[in-house]
Amino acid sequence: MKIDRSVVRSLSLFDRMSDADLDRLLTHATPRRVPQGDAVFEQGQTATNFFLLLHGRLKVTQVTEDGQQIIVRVVHPGDLFGFAKALQRSDYPGTATAATESLALSWPTDLWPQFVEQNPLLAVSTMQTIGQRLEEAHTRIREMSTQEVERRVAHAVLRLSHQAGRKEKGGIRIDFPISRQDIAEMTGTTLHTVSRILSAWEQKGLVEGGRQKLIICDLPGLAALADGGRD
Amino acid sequence: MKIDRSVVRSLSLFDRMSDADLDRLLTHATPRRVPQGDAVFEQGQTATNFFLLLHGRLKVTQVTEDGQQIIVRVVHPGDLFGFAKALQRSDYPGTATAATESLALSWPTDLWPQFVEQNPLLAVSTMQTIGQRLEEAHTRIREMSTQEVERRVAHAVLRLSHQAGRKEKGGIRIDFPISRQDIAEMTGTTLHTVSRILSAWEQKGLVEGGRQKLIICDLPGLAALADGGRD
DNA sequence: CGCATTATTGAAGGAGTTCAACCTTGGTGG
DNA sequence: CCACCAAGGTTGAACTCCTTCAATAATGCG
């Protein structure tokens, strides 16, 4: 079950790691294919593994006691995910579902300490990753506290276009199936409101919608909307 | 400028650290008194130091480009704060203001690597701290996405009572000056709404309000409110 | 082809904001 | 020592953004 170095060499996470170190890491990794719609792990399960996404997209969701769902984040290729143990948790705080057919590498959590010890750089970049994630969370809190829905949706869409945008004729396409419901769960609103907003945007030529599809046609226009009504 | 071990010995952060290690740490620390209303550091400043709060309370705030303010978190005695560098940031992401007269220990950020190297335990517990903070942020996002204002305020007040509650005749008092505006900035609403909610609660005997003052009289009652309307 | 999933759109209603006026409290300085 | 003022708090009324309810339409998969 040996994975070739070249598969991961390009990822920024392993930038400065020696071939030997990298190989040692990979000998313990198990590849795991995840069909669209399947979960890699579920909220509350004991955290037995941590993962690295190679290909595809995952949505990490949380469900409240009363059944409401929110999307905590989207996992993109090259991202580590499910490293609950690194944060001293024994279970996964959310569910990771494949939005598209995905491929991940998996390590047993027990290996994390070695993993880090052998690669101080990895520890640092993990810290950095978590730090970024904390900042993202605060940004989201700030937005939800101070901005009305349309701007929040604009920000969310812009973020998606950075992280998952693929140039296409006519605009930038979000490179995985995403529904109005998903966007609603990312911005703290309802699919109805999102639908209305996107329809309005489509009228103005800012985006082009469709079933589980979203293409940004006028990025600067959207950015202006997101930056808000400061005249 | 030698600080006595006993001052910090009781903090969970230093639980398992040897006296010698602790002393080594403290030789590099500078105590810093912060009068009420003063800032320890401000949003955007270069992160030159990281801190440990010994006494008092701090509010960490962020201001949006358009001047809106939110409270990111409250710092309690025993908490590390301002460790931007550990997250690979060069500047402080928020402003830390003393809600009461406070006392903090300060270290130059340059020392962080040594700090951690000499105390692997510290690295672990920092990770843990950041992990917790990330979870708190997600909790807040979840609440803001799914709950109406009254429940959010209830949760915020309960959290405060855990972290800063002091038993007093007639209830649990939040042990530092906190205004309706503050609570509004913690829950993403306006001081008007908070005022109305607290007034209503006071009618029902759940809390006792006052100028920059809050006493929880009926904790279970509040908890029921926070847990929400599931019948 | 039929059905489930996703999306659109109208109408009604409500929770919370905004605007505005007024009240309370405690600190300061004359 | 008390008058005054600023900061914090209360409360009403109007309004609005968004949700909720509801019904219908499009899309694509089995």
Image: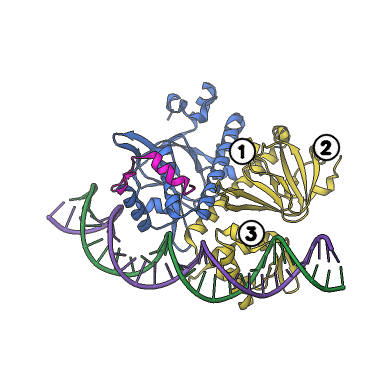
Chain colours: A blue, B yellow, C purple, D green
Quadrant showing the N terminus of chain B: top right
The residue indicated by pointer 2 is B27
The subunit carrying tag 1 is B
Q: Relative to B180, is B130 above or below?
A: above
Element marked by disc 2: helix
Q: Relative to A198, is B118 above or below?
A: above
Q: Earlier in the sequence, mark 1 or mark 2?
A: 2
Task: Rate crowding at label 1 as few (under 14), some (14 to 19) or many (20 or more) other CA atoms within 10 Å.
Answer: some
Task: Rate crowding at label 3 as few (under 14), some (14 to 19) or many (20 or more) other CA atoms within 10 Å.
Answer: some
Would residue B45 be seen by someone viewing this image from the given angle? yes
D26 sits left or right of A64 in the view? left
**Residue type (three-letter) at the residue carrying disc 2:** Thr
Task: Rate crowding at label 2 as few (under 14), some (14 to 19) or many (20 or more) other CA atoms within 10 Å.
Answer: few
The residue indicated by pointer 3 is B182
Residue A94 within the segment the image draws in magenta: no
The subunit carrying tag 2 is B
Q: Quadrant of residue A6?
A: top left
C11 sits left or right of A126 in the view? left
Q: Which residues are magenta?
A: A203-231
- Mark 3 against mark 1, which lies toward the viewer? 3
B3 sits left or right of B192 in the view? right
The residue indicated by pointer 1 is B87
